[in-house]
Image (cartoon, grey):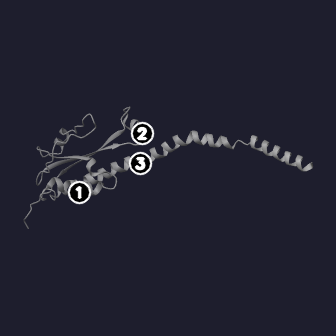
């Protein structure tokens, strides 16, 4: 009979042990915290990608503008394709080429100050309304503007950064104003 009571006591101690343990509380607390935590982590990564794509767009715009400044774009058989190819080659890591909008404007007054008269036009959907592509000629002042509408995947991040409720995108713009070099093609 001693074996029976010994087994009974052992089951009773095991039952009390399991009742006194609160390990399930950790699982419940984790279940409540994991979703906001993951959103926070993914949001931080996405904000980093947002700023990285902005820096990439700025660098690509500068490189493409250099091709206009040196006359390489104007000397190409299709200047707009040459410009777009250079821009897309620089941004292909983070930004899809078909999502980049651009405009290249020859400033008629020929001065950097006149460039301020060419403000960007953004439509109600957040897209750039381009004013055309004119790379100008030798010694012309040219404004190159590139635009990328970044769409946020993480909930609420677009709202917070843009300041507009329900807006899950934010536009990134780069503007470069240059004066083309005095180039003459075909002459030595």
Badge 2 density bin: few <14, some 14–19, many ≥20, Cα 10 Å: many
Q: CA distance from mark 1 to mark 2?
A: 31 Å
Residue occupying the point 88% across, 48% down: 4
| Quarter of the image where the C terminus is located | bottom left
- Residue that carries the numbered disc 1 in the rendered image: 86
- On screen, residue 46 versus residue 70, left or right, reads right
Element under label 1? helix
Upstream in sequence: badge 2 or badge 3: 3
- Residue that carries the numbered disc 3 in the rendered image: 48
- On screen, residue 155 versus residue 8, left or right, reads left
- Where residue 12 appears, as percent x and y from the top left, is 82, 43
Q: Quadrant of residue 163?
A: top left
Q: Nearer the viewer, residue 184 or 50?
A: 50
- Where residue 153 appears, as percent x and y from the top left, is 40, 43
Residue occupying the point 77% across, 44% down: 17
Upstream in sequence: badge 1 or badge 2: 1
- On screen, residue 85 versus residue 155, left or right, reads left
Residue 62 is tagged as: none
Q: CA distance from mark 2 to mark 3?
A: 12 Å
Residue extending furthest bottom? 188
- Where residue 113 appears, as percent x and y from the top left, is 18, 42
Residue extending furthest right? 1
Badge 1 density bin: few <14, some 14–19, many ≥20, Cα 10 Å: some
Residue 157 is tagged as: 2
Upstream in sequence: badge 3 or badge 1: 3
Q: Nearer the viewer, residue 10 or 122?
A: 10
- On screen, residue 40 versus residue 86, left or right, reads right
**Cβ atoms at labels 1 and 2 below 8 Å apart:** no
């Amino acid at each position: 009979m001693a074996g029976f009571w010994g087994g009974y006591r052992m089951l009773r101690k095991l039952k009390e042990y399991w009742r006194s343990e609160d390990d399930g509380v950790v699982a419940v607390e984790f279940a409540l915290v994991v979703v906001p935590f993951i959103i926070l982590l993914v949001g931080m990564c996405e904000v980093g990608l947002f700023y990285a794509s902005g820096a990439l767009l700025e660098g690509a715009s500068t490189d493409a503008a250099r091709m206009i400044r040196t006359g390489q774009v104007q000397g190409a058989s299709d200047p707009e394709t040459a410009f777009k190819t250079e821009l897309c080659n620089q941004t292909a890591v983070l930004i899809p080429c078909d999502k980049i909008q651009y405009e290249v404007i020859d400033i008629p007054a020929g001065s950097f100050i006149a460039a301020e008269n060419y403000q960007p036009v953004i439509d109600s959907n957040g897209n750039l309304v381009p004013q055309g592509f004119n790379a100008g000629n030798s010694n012309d002042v040219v404004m190159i503007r590139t635009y990328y509408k970044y769409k946020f995947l993480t909930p609420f991040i677009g709202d917070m950064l843009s300041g507009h409720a329900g807006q899950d995108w934010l536009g990134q713009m780069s503007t470069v104003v240059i004066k083309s070099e005095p180039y003459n093609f075909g002459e030595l």
